[in-house]
Amino acid sequence: MRAVASLLLLTPAAAFAQSGLQVAGTSAVVRVRSTIGPTREVLSGAVFGVEGHAAVWRLVLNVGYGQGSVKPDSGAPAPRDVIEGRLLVGIRLVRGLSIKAGPHIRAYISDWGTQRWLFWEARLRGERTIVGGVRGYAEVWRVLSADVNVLEPFDGGQGGEAGMLVALPRSPFWGRLAYGIERAKLGGGSRLETVEGVTLAIGYGWH
């Protein structure tokens, strides 16, 4: 019976290890800054979500979903609910280096309506072991095209994220702490949108 129980406990971990799957719950503290001509709005809040990662041979897949709300730090901006999602597919070039591309969607919902941002992004990510079960990583991206329902035409956007992955010894559980920032420019620079945040994730699956 002990052998059967041990096998049942190890089966999920073995399946995750063989398929290269990881899942995680995330919590992020975010700040949203909008500069439209002389007007500047700053809102901050928390976004909670889930994310998944899969790797098969050289193929990689990243999915994520988050939901929360932001409130004005000062002034008159209306509070907004935030919904965000992404689906990225790519290839691993060499160990610790991959490229990905896909859609990244964000929506702000307030009493004034819903503001939608759809970005098509190309991303480059690098990882490296620092010591033992601690890995550092950095990811940068460019917006290839976008569809937004605001007045100003979209000019371009980019972003980046850096952080650490910490794996528990001989365990499929791990944690991630990261800082990310992205910026979009619209209307020839008359409008700037910046989103930055610190994310904490607790995950399951062998790296």
Image (cartoon, rainbow, N blue to C red):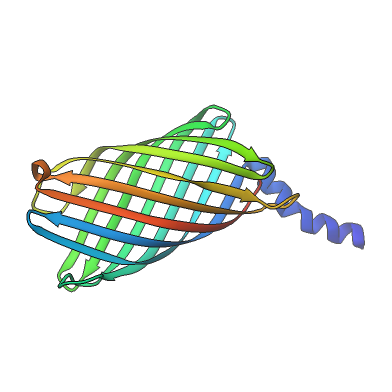
Vertical order, 201 against 144 (above or below): below
Q: Is residue 93 left or right of residue 103?
A: right
Where's residue 139, x and y in %?
43, 39
Picture residue at 22% right of the left edge, 56% below the top? 116
Picture residue at 41% right of the left edge, 45% below the top? 161
Vertical order, 40 against 134 (above or below): below
State the residue in front, 111 or 11.
111
The quadrant where residue 79 appears: bottom left
Where's residue 63, x and y in %?
45, 49
Where's residue 169, x and y in %?
73, 50
Residue farthest toward the top in the current orientation of the protein: 94
Vertical order, 191 against 61 (above or below): below
Q: Quadrant of the N terminus?
A: bottom right
Q: Quadrant of the C terminus?
A: top right
Q: Is residue 9 left or right of residue 69?
A: right
Where's residue 105, x and y in %?
31, 52
Q: Is residue 8 left or right of residue 42?
A: right
Picture residue at 17% right of the left edge, 67% below the top? 113
Picture residue at 66% right of the left edge, 40% below the top? 131
Q: How many numbered marks have been drawn onto this rendered protein structure?
A: 0
